[in-house]
Amino acid sequence: MPTYVTTPIYYVNAQPHLGHAYTTIIADTYSRFRRLSGDSVRFQTGTDEHGEKIAEAAAKAGSNPREYVDAIAALFQQTWPLLNVQPDYVIRTTDADHIKTVQRILDQVHRQGDIYFSEYAGLYCRGCERFLTDKELVEGKCPDHLVEPEPITEQNYFFRMSKYQDWLIEHIKKNPEFITPERYRNEVLAFLDEPLEDLCISRPTSRLTWGIPLPFDNRFVTYVWFDALINYLTGIGYPDGPLFADYWPVAEHVIAKDILKPHAIYWPTMLKSMGLSPFKRLHVHGYWNVDSTKMSKSLGNVIRPRELVEEYGVDTVRYFLLREMSFGLDASFSYDAILARQNADLANDLGNLFSRSLTMIGKYADQHIPPLHSELLQKSDHEVQEALQTMATTYTAEMNAFRFHRALQAVWEVIGLLNRYIVTNAPWELAKDPEQHQRLQTVLALLGGSLWHIAVVLKPIMPETAAKMAQALGMEEALATAVLRPATPLAPLPAGRGLGEVPQLFPRMEKKKKAASKTARSNQAQAAHGTKKTGPEAQHTGLLSFAQFQALDLRVAQINAAQRVKKSERLLRLSVSAPEERTVVAGIAQSYSPEELIGKKVVLVANLQPAKLMGIVSEGMVLAAKEPLEDGSERLRLLFVDSVMSPGSKIS
Ligand code: MSP
């Protein structure tokens, strides 16, 4: 099947930032996913280079528009390889074939009577490059650019957009997937409840020359949106190229909510007027803020993709962006958040699973994938096999629906399960008993096979990591040609395959020095003002006074109920009595199953300040020791107390 994926074409009045990187990584990931599913894919991005905004930016930079757009377009093109984004085609609206296509379409639509000349008086927003209706204004200002639009009276050409309003409403209603997520579909339908105005599609050359001349009146240039949207057709050779016939019917546009209206209203009506079918799907995502504030040059908080990649590596950046944002909603970027994902999800969960599994295959199976003895399969093995199947199905459905965060959650559920599988099956114990040799082989084979499946599903999201994993498993070539079809499970890893070198996938990272020294400075300041609380770190001896120890309220607590915390691989939610009932969230899910904890008595720190973990308030902490395992990882062991002790007994 063919798939055609596009990003917006970015204005060249600003340098590439996190927002551009996100949309383009999404489109790249989706393209890679469809390729992995066996499709032939065309992925297009590009730059939007005409219009007032660009002319103004060029003038401000003291440059002529042509030189200016060349320079910034080059910056965009240099960014994509850094992010491992591989478009098949990069379009620029200043390309000769694009200009020809726009003029050809204008001529056609004009000839058939859908473009007319008229005088218009309205309120014009330069930022939006369009006239705004009274209803769109908030306190007299453009809600996006926070400036009062200028009253302008002008003669211009108009596109009869209103003519297609009823058709558009019908089309959106009949095709629930046309605009997703649903909130944006509803937003468009609500907008279409009001009569649609015709669209002004020209600008007089007295006001703007940096645009495509109207083919039927050279006193005007084309309105930048009418020019820009057509890029999606130019790039595949409209009207008669073979690519066009294959790819137009399956076009999927990826955008953010800021440009919903041009894509959901102008564009389908333009296509209808041209006699073309509308695009297949429009995927609309939310906005990235930075530390919960709008990202903007004036606030100096613009995040540059190049710097992020240099600091964290390309796969961490790709993973973070896809995992952290629920597609459709806004998300907040912070260095703490990316560091947390790097250390917890990538270095700890995936990285450890990979290195401990491969180290054990190296040590106990002589660097070769051992055979799997199906007659020896136990409950925990079946659980892993079923989980892999569920992962493939869920992952495929979620990726197709652009819910990347959910697809990744499905993968991380299996990663969590496998980490627990290692602990419960303890291969290092099996290795001590020669009678358990085949069992040991089976456990190791299942681990190797699972890692192969994980590498395959991670390929569209983290291509480098997937390649490293496959290389270590001796499956490098197989990864290049792998096809994922959940109905036909992936073949198991062939036994006897020799392992390559085991690379470290993700290093654990420390908080940036800059941030650390900031904290140190603020501590000094606090101490100087006498506001810093005395705590162990303030004592030069490093020893606690008895009074300090006594401040800890340690109690015996009985676990009455335990369940996994949704969407978390590490957390269990416990209901304990000590003796009053309270909720404690504990990071022990990789070491204990909920069932085995019921009725057990543990040590509770009862006077800790409550903390919110994954939205659940945890009222205390249960104590556990870290037990080092032979493969270099750790398992947590709770401090159980004698069952005769009553809940609530003070420990001192
Ligand atoms: N040139 C038009 C698009 C024409 S498409 C036919 C344009 N360009 S833009 O440079 O302003 O890019 C807007 C797009 O950049 C958004 O729709 C989104 O894809 C991306 N983002 C820009 N800032 C963003 C965030 N802060 N967060 C997420 N994405 C954002 O509009």
Image (spheres, rainbow, N blue to C red):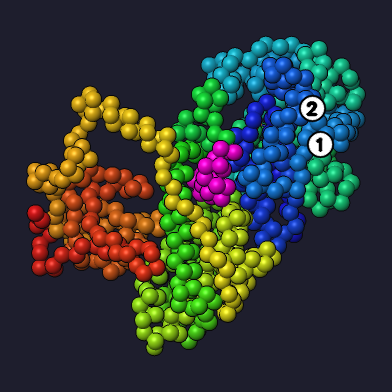
Q: Is residue 317 within the magenta segment?
A: yes
Task: Name the residue: 65% across, 21% down.
Answer: 127
**Total numbered labels:** 2
Q: Earlier in the sequence, mark 2 or mark 1?
A: 2
Task: Name the residue: 71% across, 30% down.
Answer: 72
Confirm whether residue 469 shows in the render. Answer: yes
378 to the left or right of 233 = left
Horizontal and vertical percent position of residue 56: 71, 18
Query: What kind of residue is marked 1?
Result: Ser
Q: Circle 2 is placed at which residue position?
A: 159
Residue closer to the observer: 374 or 616? 374
The magenta stretch is 305-328
Q: Tell me the quadrant of ligand 1.
A: top right
Label placed on residue 131: none
Label placed on residue 273: 1
Q: Is residue 311 within the magenta segment?
A: yes
Horizontal and vertical percent position of residue 353: 45, 63
413 to the left or right of 530 = right
206 to the left or right of 73 = right
Question: Secondary structure under badge 2?
Answer: strand
Horizontal and vertical percent position of residue 133: 64, 21
Residue 222 picture quarter: top right
Query: What kind of residue is marked 2?
Result: Phe
